[in-house]
Image (cartoon, grey):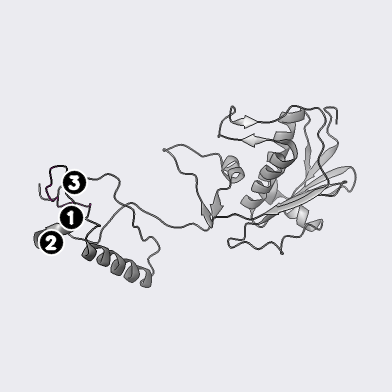
Amino acid sequence: ENGQAIATVVAVKADTAAAKLISEWVKLMSGATLAIATNDAGTGVRIYVGRAAEGAGLKLSDIESRSSEGWRVKCDGKNIYIAGQTNSATMRAVGRFLEEEFGCRWFADTDWGRHYPEAKTLKVRTVEYSETPGFLYRRMWGAEGAFKNESWLAWTGQGGNAVPMAHGWNILSKDDFEKHPDWFRLDENGKRINGPWYNIGHPEVRKLFMEWALKSSKNGQKAISFSPPDDHREDFSS
């Protein structure tokens, strides 16, 4: 209020990152620095984050999420409660709180990607809302060295049950080319190439793919890739 902190963020050590995130953005907007406490002093406005919010009565068990990543925000006119079913879900909840109550946006993992209002006094509604991810697995994937800010990734929704993946086909051997050249790709001149790219339009190749995938899954293999190789156009015959 008027550029002065009148609220305290209450969070246990395990939720420090989420507590720091909300404190950081409040300072960006108002210039006020919110204190972060591990124990509830019981006075003033409190912003309970993560496990502290659950301890203060915020219910999460009724939120159905396939990946256990539901979160809830509650503003009761006195205090604020923000928590998720996992640490990353709590981070996401903080981001959504800042978006919904103040219009903040974190478009890119840069200073210029942060958008927020400037106001000496910040007010929130008396409101409650919750959310669960629409996708079981979300991952931000870019060039090497990109997307390393864990706070930004959590805010934008990264997380879930990881799905192993790879870029490579390994169901045919080099020797298969002699017997079944039609199983392999054509180059730009119409020549069959003995390499890692196959003729997936061929029904026998598709059948081999299915048999390989089912067998691999039965044997416990987690990464079953139907993605083509990363532009490896070698000719094993040369």
- Disc assigned to residue 162: none
Tag count: 3
| Residue 210 image offset from top left, x and y in percent | 31, 67
Q: Residue at x 59, y 28 (%)?
A: 111
**Within the image, what quadrant is residue 45 found in?**
top right
Q: In this view, does 176 lie above or below 125?
A: below
Q: Which three-letter amino acid code belongs to the residue tagged 1? A: Phe
Q: Which amino acid does label 2 sit on?
A: His
From the image, tell me which residue sits under label 3: 234
Q: Which of marks 3 and 1 is nearer the N terminus?
A: 1
Q: Which residue is identified by label 1?
A: 184
Residue range (magenta): 189-197
Q: What crowding class fits label 3: few (fewer than 14 Cα within 10 Å), some (14-19), or many (20 or more)?
A: few
Q: Is residue 146 left or right of residue 151?
A: left
Judge whether residue 117 is colored magenta: no
Earlier-in-chain disc, 2 versus 3: 2
Q: Is residue 162 something one can see in this rendering?
A: yes
Disc 2 marks which residue? 180
On the image, the x and y values in percent for residue 229 come to: 29, 49
Residue 96 position within the rendered picture, expressed as x and y whole percent measured from the top left: 68, 44
Structural distance between the alpha carbons of marks 2 and 3: 18 Å
Please identify, in this view, whether the residue under mark 2 or under mark 3 is nearer the observer. Answer: 2
Position of the N terminus by quadrant? top right
Q: Name the amino acid, label 3.
A: Glu
SS at circle 1: loop
Task: Please give the name of the residue rendered at 14% of the width and 52% of the height, measured from the top-left corner.
Answer: 194
- Classified by dominant secondary structure, the portion drawn in magenta counts as loop
